[in-house]
């Protein structure tokens, strides 16, 4: 009885540790060697010139969502 209680406690604690580590994970996209956090924008060179792209999650992977909006000139 004590052994099964200890094993149950270890399983529960390992699940909690794993879930808290997953919750703290920051997903990023990469462009020109730079990590861009999920939800942030970057100006990415496309066949149609530089466009604003947003780092987003698609099917549990990060991916650039490229808009039709040209990058601001500055």
Image: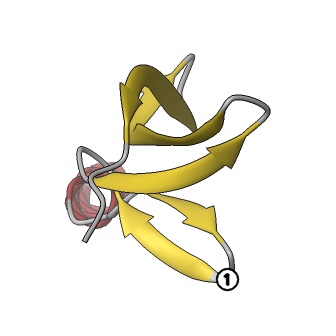
Rendered position, 47 above or below 32? above
Most foreground residue, 46 or 3: 46
Determine if residue 2 is in view.
yes
Most foreground residue, 12 or 36: 36
Rendered position, 30 above or below 62? below
Q: Would you identify the image quadrant in which residue 42 lies? A: bottom left
Q: Position of residue 16 (x, y in %)?
A: 21, 56
Rendered position, 35 above or below 12? below
* Label 1 Cα crowd, 10 Å radius (few <14 / some 14-19 / many 20+): few
SS for dot 1: loop
Point 44% across, 30% down: residue: 57
The residue wearing badge 1 is 33
Point 25% across, 53% down: residue: 40
Q: Position of residue 43 (x, y in %)?
A: 45, 55
Residue at the extreme bottom: 33
Point 79% across, 32% down: residue: 47
Quarter of the figure that contains the C terminus: bottom left
Most foreground residue, 56 or 9: 56
Q: Position of residue 51 (x, y in %)?
A: 48, 39
């Amino acid at each position: 009885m004590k052994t099964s209680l200890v094993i149950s406690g270890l399983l529960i604690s390992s699940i909690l540790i794993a879930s808290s580590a997953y919750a703290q994970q920051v997903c990023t996209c990469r462009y020109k060697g730079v990590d861009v956090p999920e939800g942030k924008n970057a100006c990415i060179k496309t066949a149609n010139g530089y466009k604003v792209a947003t780092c987003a999650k698609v099917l549990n992977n990060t991916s650039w969502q490229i808009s039709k909006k040209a990058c601001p000139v500055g």
